[in-house]
Amino acid sequence: MNLNEYASQDATGLATLIRSGEVSVAEVQKVARQALEAVNPKINALAAPLFDKPLDYNASGPFAGVPFAIKDIVCHAANVPTRFGSRMIPANFAFPHDTELMKRWRAAGLATLGISTTPEFGYNSNTEALVYGSTKNPWNTARSPGGSSGGAAALVASRALPVAHANDGGGSIRIPAGICGVVGLKPTRGRVSLAPDAAEALSGMAIEFAVSRSVRDTAALLDAVEGPAAGEKYEIARPARPYLKEVGADPGRLKIAISPKGWSPVPIHPACVAAVEKTAKVLAGLGHHIEEATPKFDVEAFDNANVNLWSVGLADWIMAFAETLKLTPSPDNLEATIWACLQHGKKLSAIDLLTSEHVMNTVCRTVGAFFQDYDLLLTPTVAAPATSLGFLNANDPTLDATGWTRKIFTNMPFTALFNVTGQPAISLPLCMSDDGLPVGLQFVGHFGDEGRLIQIASQLEQAMPWINRKPAVCAGA
């Protein structure tokens, strides 16, 4: 297997070749390392050197031997260093146990070769943590890959890896997927376990999963990791059948709301508006009923509640690490906006927190009523194609917690709402801008109904194929 052959395969394709004996695991691993070593100097998407050998995995799993990376935050492997993107955490810090999700990645047979970059404590829609330096977009290395799963999306977009772990507290799977031109599904809240470290993260907003290049990989990965662990706070209904069976399944005639301009005061780039309109025409041609409609909710109250919930979540993480590792958080080891959020979070009372959660309950009820009239909602994934590096600067000392949160949420307006409602949402790389940058489209489904999202994604993968598009930085190109 050479680099071109490796880069042409998705994870399912590689797994099939390995199972058939056409290629060996050792051969795939060797070429994967070549691919990673070729692209990473150009995009800086690895948080640390590659492991000497893959982390242990199940050689009988559905993805046995397929190269993989985990993001440097939340999901972790026993005795493997993780820094959550922060200079505060020592380079040799490691948890003594696997998270439940890590166990399931191993059980699926994924061969973890390294760790991908994240912004500090995941709180940015860019990936330029001071601890690693800037991660770059493989389509244009002067541009951002998005965040916070920017490293994962850049590695998959550049074809150095077929799939990679990602997570999403306000859009951190979907935003980099949309900006880098890959598939990014945020599952329903409760679909993927956060055990054993948390019952829920960021007041229920944070979700774990992955990015991929194909819908079939996304479906098969979700089959491999979905479902509760022992002792969950809540459990949601399991799927009626494997998600892989939804690939190619007829979704029927759906009623789809489209919202090309959404609810943000920031102007939406013409390429993003045009992408929604183009996709809507394709959907209508496939027999779906299209209406322009937008969920209505109190955006100001929503934004204010996010300032508090994110600040408290960050403060909880930072102070837990500080206590465990006997460290003192300071402006010397935290980026300026993260330090500001820590100070704000420490000042908030329990009543402040509960008041913010009451606001979010009202938002959920309002948006839930909207979805009673529609099967899906279609929006741009982001307000504009990839922005320049440094646009979302987490080390800007002029921004307090409110200023930083509003800068992120105003400029990335379409995704965070569905972290609060808990609904599944997927970004698909359906369109390109005139200057050659990916334009992702977000589909949002009903709570618990990832199956319908996979059906519509599969239908559009056939109608508007993306798999053969290659960025400027691409393994084997």
Image (spheres, rainbow, N blue to C red):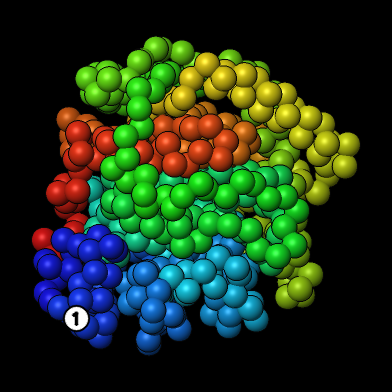
Q: Which quarter of the figure is the N terminus placed in?
A: bottom left
Taking 446 as reference, is 165 above or below it?
below
Image coordinates for residue 203, horizontal then vertical, percent: 71, 45
Task: Report if residue 136 is visible in the image.
Answer: no
Q: Which residue is mark 1?
A: 21
Q: Residue furthest front?
A: 240
Q: Nearer the viewer, residue 4 or 438?
A: 4
Q: Which quarter of the figure is the C terminus placed in?
A: bottom left
Q: Nearer the viewer, residue 307 or 358?
A: 358
Taking 361 as reference, is 60 above or below it?
below
Image coordinates for residue 280, horizontal then vertical, percent: 29, 20
Image coordinates for residue 81, horizontal then vertical, percent: 55, 77
Q: Nearer the viewer, residue 406 or 460?
A: 460
Q: Nearer the viewer, residue 51 or 449?
A: 449
Crowd rating for badge 1 (residues with CA inside 10 Å; few <14, some 14–19, many 20+): few
User: Residue placed at 35% from the left, 75% from the top?
Assistant: 64
The kind of residue tagged 1 is Gly
Q: Is residue 248 left or right of residue 357?
A: left
Q: Is residue 167 left or right of residue 34?
A: right
Q: Secondary structure at mark 1?
A: loop
Task: Report if residue 53 is visible in the image.
Answer: yes
User: Residue placed at 47% from the left, 69% from the top?
Assistant: 105
User: Residue placed at 73% from the left, 38% from the top?
Assistant: 308
Q: Is residue 399 left or right of residue 185?
A: right
Q: Is residue 360 left or right of residue 454?
A: right
User: Residue placed at 83% from the left, 44% from the top?
Assistant: 347
Image coordinates for residue 148, horizontal then vertical, percent: 48, 51
